Amino acid sequence: RRLIDEKWLRMLSEGELQQVISGSTGGTLDVDDLQRHTEVSNCSGPRDRLVKDFFTALRAMEPQQQVKVLRFVTSCSRAPLLGFSHLQPPFTIYKVHIRNDSEKLPTASTCFNTLKLPTYSSWKIMKQKLEFVIVQDAGFELD
């Protein structure tokens, strides 16, 4: 049995079919859409300074870096085809309390699309720490 009739598949180019299956390939991240559909944990809510700092830092990054942050957290460098409202589980920021900026780096639980983000003293420090971890090509935290 076929899941999709071949005549429907023939209507799409190779690139269009790839986008339907794997999501957007534009190489850019819709930060506004991500922010609208981000959940938060262990903090006061979307207006928490940590969350605001994260999106300020993300917006200050180059598009390629933004995509790497998405990959770091979700293990996928493409946004869902229909936007972040369809990401399951949702992109989540988990607040990690620290005493000083050198105590911890950001980590991720990719199976849960969760970024474990320390409470850095500024968005600029947060940006530096995120830029460091995304070039390491690691995201799993084994506790």
Image: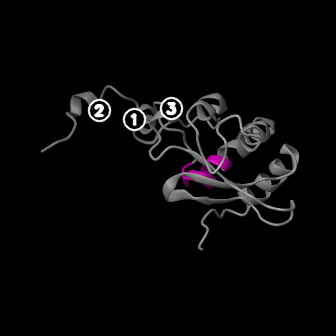
Q: Residue furthest left?
A: 1
Along the polypeptide, which appears first: circle 3 or circle 1?
A: 1
At label 3, the amino acid type is Gly
Q: Which secondary structure, mark 1? A: helix
> Would you call the spot at circle 1 few (<14 residues within 10 Å), some (14-19), or many (20 or more)?
some
Q: Residues within 10 Å of mark 2 (few under 14, many from 20)?
A: few
Q: Name the image quarter holding residue 49.
A: top right
Tell me the number on the disc at residue 17.
1
Badge 3 element: loop
Mark 2 or 3, nearer chain start: 2
Whether residues under marks 2 and 3 lie with C-beta atoms below 8 angstroms apart, the answer is no
Q: Residue furthest front?
A: 44
Q: Tell me the kind of residue under disc 1.
A: Leu
Mark 2 / mark 1, whichever is N-terminal:
2
Nearer the observer, 49 or 126: 49
State whether the magenta stretch is mostly helix, strand or loop. Answer: helix
Pick the front one: 20 or 86: 86
Q: CA distance from mark 3 to mark 1?
A: 17 Å
Question: What residue lies at 63% left-to-right and 38% top-to-bottom?
Answer: 27
Q: Which residues are magenta?
A: 69-76
Horizontal arrangement in the rendering, residue 125 relative to residue 109 (left or right):
right
- The answer to whether marks 3 and 1 mark residues whose Cβ atoms lie closer than 8 Å is no
Which residue is nearer to you in this view: 57 or 8? 57
* Residue at image location 59% in from the left, 73% down from the top: 142
Q: Residue at x 48, y 33 (%)?
A: 85
Query: Within the magenta stretch, is there residue 70?
Result: yes
Count all numbered tags in the image, as a single digit: 3
Judging by the rendered image, the residue that carries numbered circle 3 is 83
**Position above or below: 68 against 105:** above
Residue 9 is labelled as 2
